[in-house]
Image (spheres, grey):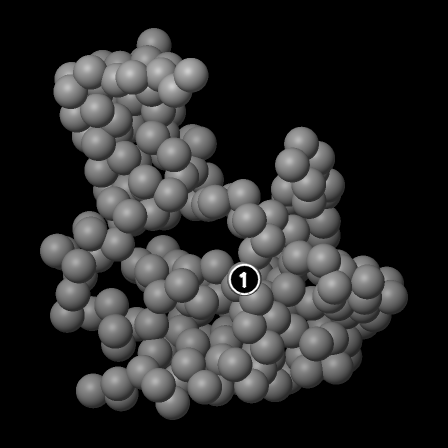
Amino acid sequence: MTARHSPRDDRMRQLLAQEAARIMETEGIHDHYLAKRKAAERLGAEDTRNLPRNTEIEQARSEFLRLFQADTTPVRLRALREAALQAMKLLSRFQPRLVGSLLSGTVGIYSDIELHLFSETQEEISLFLDEHRIPYEQEERRIRVGRDSYRNFPVYGFRAGVWTVDLTIFHIDGLRQPPLSPVDGRPERRANLAAVSDLLEEQDPK
């Protein structure tokens, strides 16, 4: 049986989603759960169990960008996609795929270029970056790969002009089975080089 929420609960859930979206866009927080907890603390609702879903926060983010960054978002989106395309061409041997906010179009001032790369070993990619004299930082990221399962994947980060590029490294077999989206839990959308080129052609350059 589906639990019913009072109008007051629904209103608080909406306020939490809006505040979490604002925190993500103004403070550069990418983790939805952390943004929810910060929002609950700031709204005096630390004990609430009625936190918004990630999809609700993404809807609130879209509305925030529409209201406060409508003039700059299209320009930023195009610039980021162009930079992503150049990075993908450079890394083409690793069959790069664009993911995240650049693919959905929900980009703010803290949005990064997120790419998935595929290789037999991560050393192949680190050697490639070294050979091209690209300084990078390495970390691990916990990614959801099944309904209740997570794995840590290596992530390389580097600067491309004014933008940050994050490379998440998957085994070559990962091309056939994308991880689950942190937003809606479905297989994550990915775009190859040709698809990103099409996105740029479709986007109004003005």
Query: Is the residue 157 above or below the residue 149 in the image?
Result: below
* Amino acid type of the residue that numbered disc 1 sits on in the rendered structure: Arg
**Figure quadrant of residue 50:** top left
Left or right? Give the position of 97 relative to 106.
right
Left or right? Give the position of 109 relative to 166.
left
- Where is residue 88 shown, x and y percent of the image? 59, 79
Residue 123 or residue 32, whichever sits in front: 32
- Where is residue 4 shown, x and y percent of the image? 29, 17
**Figure quadrant of residue 168:** bottom right
Measuring 74% from the left and 64% from the top, which residue is drawn there? Answer: 176
- Where is residue 107 shown, x and y percent of the image? 34, 61
Query: Is the residue 146 above or below the residue 100 in the image?
Result: above
Measuring 42% from the left and 31% from the top, which residue is drawn there? Answer: 34
Query: Is the residue 11 above or below the residue 176 in the image?
Result: above
Residue 37 visible in the current orientation = yes
The N terminus - image quarter: top left
Residue 164 visible in the current orientation = no
- Where is residue 185 shown, x and y percent of the image? 54, 43
Left or right? Give the position of 83 relative to 4.
right
In the picture of the structure, the residue carrying the numbered disc 1 is 189
Left or right? Give the position of 197 relative to 149.
left
Measuring 25% from the left and 73% from the top, which residue is drawn there? Answer: 74
Question: How many circles with numbers are drawn on the protein?
Answer: 1
Query: Is the residue 78 above or below the residue 29 in the image?
Result: below
Q: Residue most toward the right?
A: 120
Q: Within 10 angstroms of label 1, few (less than 14), some, or many (20 or more) residues? A: some
The C terminus - image quarter: bottom left
Question: Tag 1, which secondary structure?
Answer: loop
Measuring 29% from the left and 48% from the top, which residue is drawn there? Answer: 59
Residue 185 or residue 64, whichever sits in front: 185
